[in-house]
Image (cartoon, rainbow, N blue to C red):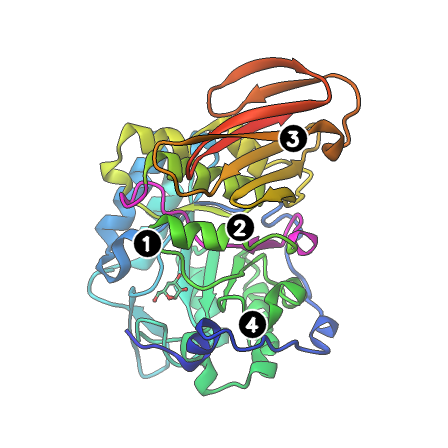
Amino acid sequence: MRTYPQRAAIRHGVRLLILSGALALPALGQDPTLALTPPMGWNSWNHFACKVSDAVVRAAADAIASNGMKAAGYTYVNVDDCWQGERDAKGVIHPNERFPDMKSLGDYIHSKGLKFGIYSSPGPNTCANFEGSWQHEEQDAQQYAAWGVDYLKYDWCSADHVYTDDQMPAAYKKMHDALVRTGRPIVLSLCQYGIAAVWRWGASVGGNLWRTTDDIRDDYISMSAIGFMQNGLEKYAGPGHWNDPDMLEVGNGKMSHEEYRTHMSLWCILAAPLLSGNDLSKMEPVDLEILTNREVIAVDQDPKGVQGHRIWEEGPYEIWMKPLADGSAAVGFFNRGEGMDHTDRLTLQLKDIGITGPATVRDLWAHRDLGQFTGSFTAEVPTHGVVMVRIH
Ligand code: GLA
């Protein structure tokens, strides 16, 4: 797999380019009903990478439709990189031998009441060096629509070989406009790792979501670094356009269940897209339970569409809050400390979330009402763990 200079630049902390004038680009004709809450579904990349195939994707659709995930809100079944084959003499893109018939795959996913997602790049090649959409945007958008695609992840990758950074918004808008011209509502997911403060202009070029960071890995350090650095981006998210701190790693096996609960809780407080990235055909019941916790998902999918933010921190302890449509607040107590088998007490002053009288508190992981509290509420939080509550 190639390393592109742009990504190396991010890793080395090069100053972000702020693109002046990008906000002037109108996102014409976008379907106003798309992604009113953060998209939920599955994506092949985190677990399968280039071992993805038609059979893998059908198995994921089967699992979502039957294991409770669809009922919990998971909808999109997204093929990431590595599905592409060659273009024919007319420039039409064809899948590779692992995907015999994309239309039939789309039909299969739709027959389960689910939606079909695909992946490409504005550059000549994708990050795994397959064919990108450069100079074929219109043709590819038409092809995706003919296959029944409902979601496109559009990944910068080699685009920096053919565009400068200040052409980035226009490159994304080009595909957005091509998708609109198909007449099919297709969610557009921008993936360029947070370059050039994409949150400031992603919506204006028609993005329904945009990655705010480099790729997540299945470990606490990566997940927590990404998740907790989202603070401050909340003003850019809302119905139809979301910050995307990357896909879920729950169930991939390298974090503890406590850490996966932290991952899920934080993503839901962030109103992040919830794209599971594990092998759904071989899931531990506890991972399924984490991914389908309806009370936690309700926080993510709350119709008010406000991304949460940090309201308190002290050393490794953080408290985050997300205001909800019914006037309640979701609150996450996080312990980022390193002591093994250790629990620490974190206290929220209720006035910090605007509550002066008595408040009722419900634990969203224990599914238990904890009673009434006045003045403050204290949670006992294990190392790398979370307590997530809803406060009225
Ligand atoms: C980039 C993206 C990942 C994934 C891979 C595929 O690294 O950030 O999410 O799509 O490309 O090659």
Q: Which amino acid does the dot numbered 3 rest on? A: Leu
Cα separation between marks 4 and 3: 42 Å
Q: Is the C-beta of the residue carrying label 1 under 8 Å from the nearest atom of ligand 1? A: yes
135 left or right of 306?
Answer: left
Splitting the image into 4 quarters, where does residue 330 fall?
top right
User: How busy is the neighbourhood of tag 4: few (under 14 within 10 Å), some, or many (20 plus)?
Assistant: many
Quadrant holding the N terminus: bottom left
Sequence-first disc among 1 and 3: 1
Return the residue at label 3: 348
Sequence-first disc among 1 and 2: 1
For the residues bearing labels 1 and 3, Cβ distance under 8 angstroms: no
Q: Looking at the picture, how far across and down is residue 115, in whole percent?
A: 44, 47
Per the rendering, the mark at residue 172 is: 4
**Of labels 2 and 3, the one closer to you:** 3
Splitting the image into 4 quarters, where does residue 95 fall?
bottom left
**Of labels 4 and 1, the one closer to you:** 1
Return the residue at label 1: 46
Sequence-first disc among 4 and 1: 1
Q: Which amino acid does the dot numbered 1 rest on? A: Asn
User: How busy is the neighbourhood of tag 2: few (under 14 within 10 Å), some, or many (20 plus)?
Assistant: some
Q: Looking at the picture, how far across and down is residue 98, in whole percent?
A: 21, 61
For the residues bearing labels 4 and 1, Cβ distance under 8 angstroms: no
User: How busy is the neighbourhood of tag 3: few (under 14 within 10 Å), some, or many (20 plus)?
Assistant: some
187 or 297, nearer to the observer: 297
Q: Looking at the image, which residue is at 74% across and 73% down? A: 24
The answer to whether one can see residue 327 in this image is no
Q: Which amino acid does the dot numbered 2 rest on? A: Phe
Return the residue at label 2: 228
Q: Which amino acid does the dot numbered 4 rest on? A: Tyr
Question: Which residue is farthest right?
Answer: 356
